[in-house]
Amino acid sequence: MLYGRTDDCAVLAGLLGATGGGTSAAVVVRGEAGVGKTALMDWLQQEAVQRGGEVLRCAGVASESHLPFAGLHQLLRPAIHVMPALARLHQEALGGALGLSRRRGVDPFLVGVAALSLLGELAEGRAVTCIVDDAQWLDAPTADVFRFVARRLDAEGVLLVFAVRDPDDGSFEAPGLPEHWLRGLDDGASSALLVDRAPMISAEVKDRLIEHHAGNPLALIELAPLLTGDQLSGREPLPDPLPMGGGVERLYAARAAGLSPGAQQLLLLAATADTAGLDLVLGASVALGIDSGSLQEAEASGLIAAGHGVVVFKHPLVRSAIHQQSTFLQRRRGHLAMAALLDDEANADRRAWHLVRAATGPDDQLAVLLEASAERAMARGGPAAAVDRWQWAAEFSRSEVDRARRFLYAAEVAVQAGQPERARQLLALHGALLPDAPSRARALLGAIEMRHGSPEAAYHLLVEAANDLAAVDPSAALDSLVLAGEAATFLGDPRLTQQVSVLATKLREAGAMVDGSVVDLLVGLSKLFDGNWSEGSRILAGVVDESVVSSEYDDVLRSGRAAMYLGRLGDARTLYARAVSQARDSSSAGRLAPMLDRLAYIELLLGRLPDAEVHGLEGLRLADDLSLDAGVGHVSMAMLYAYRGQQTECRAQVRLAMELAESRQLKMVGAGAQAALGLLELGAGRLDEALSALESVGSSTDGHPGILRWATPDLVEAAARSGRPEVCAPAVERLQAWADASGLPIPVAALARCRGLLASGNEAVRYFEDALRADDQDTRPLERARIQLLLGETLRRSRQRAQSRTYLRSAMATFERLGASPWADRAGTELRASGEAVTPRDPSGRATLTPQELQIAQYAADGDSNAEIAARLFLSRRTVEYHLAKVYTKTGVTSRRHLATATALT
């Protein structure tokens, strides 16, 4: 029976009830040791079963935290029979992680998707409750998978509950998940619990015990048996101090201390074992000559229970109490005995773990074992566990060369595990052994800085590495230069892009076997940043044309980047969409997230707001799943919300982008955020605020030339309407250089639009008409509508009202179709001023799909099955079915073949 947990049970019961209706949920229950988390989880399990649901349960074990996916295997073992229903790629990933297949090199993210799909399939017939106790002791790969699943649960009918001891030496961080704190029992519940355990207890004694243990139920339960009947009834005084003054662990330690030496040794073996296997504990006890009756004595004490091949502690605190009162030499004897028993290949990782804990100094043989163990962990998709093993291998290596080499490997794996700070620390250990750090280490540190730190620091590290590698490994040198070039473009510094260009050219001129198109990309970008638009455009056009039909991911990425800087947005969208598709096909989330961010930004520039929203939100969600920075994603969403006039949402994304830009010196991201803010203010008619934000985009200290190119028309509009046209003159000159050199419709139309804003009367009309003719293919509907709005406004103010209405109607229709409300309102105001009646916008009659519903509907319209859509979007099949049903309801269609038409109308 639970005491004092009515409210806590109600919270979990509410979540449990929702799963019966097909809704999923996740919650983290936190509380101190002994507060009753496990008892609450027991109640939840019983309640879920009584409601007809299925329960999967596991518990983190501190001694198993080194075993990749140990917790995942424990939780999903009863559901393995569902695996054949999963997509082949998911079966292979999950099978590899759980040791059920020979699949190697498993992507941990893909394991998470597979686990989510498995739970969704399992919940097909009835609700599923997953209980994870002592989550603070989960192995790192399992914890990552569980966090991913918890964030992705949607409409599967699955409840995932984590119970976490907090505070504890371990930790289970779960940002974004709801938390429920389990507090100590109140006096009434504590009193009822004590009376239940000791009916003869007096009121005075009861009050003393409640005060002493502050509502901790485990302490109250374990204390009563330590007191005599006379002490409990108040006929004899209570001991002073009371037992367990130092906590519950002291009680368990005292109880263990009263056992025979053999029973104490057996308890210590159980506490130092890496699993709960009874055979290992008994085998080690025989090897150490422990009396055969010791197991019975230990069980009789109530501290452990043995049976069904396992030995289980009454409470995790028993294990820690036994461990804390032992000495290193006592534990070492146990570890060596168990290592000797684990001498077969299947148990090589466990043997290495015990030997690490028994080691007293450098041991090359152990280092070799750990190196092999690290490679096995990587093969199973456990880079976090592999980092530990590489680091241990380094620490146990005798020679400095081997130690340095293994620290470097550990750092490389730490990067893959998403642990940049740890990678930096490992590289520092490597550098301390080899002060003249090899170029490989510098290149790795540069890559870490580029992804997680300062682009400026990354640039210098990568250039140094490229210089060192040029003679011995030209291909690796060029790889470093590509990253250095990316850093230089993020910084927007033409001097840096030029240096990268010079070094890349030297590599090619030296006859090195390097990819010429990569060199051309670096040289072409340098020319553009240096203002040589003619030469830069020619070189980059060659890069795009050479690879525009390529299916190689790196070629596609390189060409997309070149097309973007050239202003060939149609080609850029095609290329980045191809990169996104390739990343989806390979389930490579690490590649997909940044590609979605870039694709969203390009779609915004093209005026494809619904598509930009779909891809931008998915990119941010993936970045959150993978703990990646998403500066471009925040900028894209800020721009989208700016077009729509969503003030709060836009400013929130601007704030996130600016925080990232300032912390990492990302000028491109900061300038993009200011451009979005300027657009928001311009749409709202706040011209001074708009001009202030847009001026900063062109600032020599905080601005970025790549962002300014696209923001120039907004800057000119804000400047012209504020009566300060002089502030935009330099930006217009740069825009003219781009238009003259490339002859592309986008810069030519933008230049004519800017000229029109700076002119008046008939001259302005001619410029705006030129702008419309320059981009007459309607490739950028939103920008075309803005030009039509400007032309309509100019004509109306020139008293040409009839002519103005044609442009204003067209502009308003486009703005309304794309959801650009501030601009639609402005066009409507102009239309009314021209003398035309305007019907107020009424979107209520149109189907409104969420971005995720729209994305699912588009894939379904293309013929993808629900399972295929789920695999593409890293969702469960049941979630896809749920959202597709909502699409049918909202659009009124009843079949997939009608979805294409329906989604086009939303």
Image: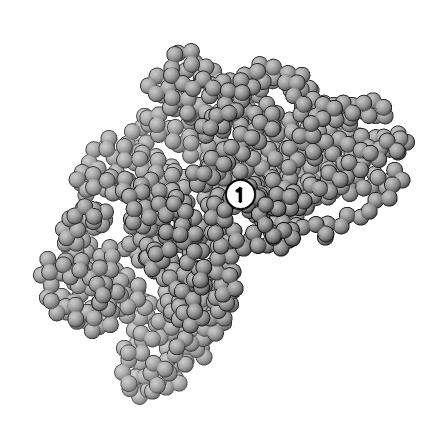
Percent from the top left, x then y, of residue 249? 30, 66
Can residue 870 be seen? no
Q: Quadrant of residue 257?
A: bottom left
Kindly identify the residue that appears in the image at 48 percent across and 74 percent down.
6
Name the amino acid type tagged 1. Answer: Gly
Dot 1 corresponds to which residue? Answer: 863
**Foreground of the two, 309 or 385:** 309
Residue 28 % position (x, y): 45, 60
Q: Is mark 1 on a helix, strand or loop?
A: loop
Please give the name of the residue rendered at 47% of the width and 39% of the height, measured from the top-left corner. Answer: 584
Residue at left offset 37%, top offset 52%: 83
Viewer-proximal residue among 824 and 358: 824
Q: In this view, does 433 lie above or below 837?
A: above
Provide residue 644's location: percent of width, then percent of height: 69, 43
In the rendered image, the vertical position of residue 357 relative to residue 131, given as above or below? above
Note whether 39 is above or below 728 in the view shown: below
Task: Please indicate whether residue 67 sits to the left or right of residue 701 in the image.
Answer: left
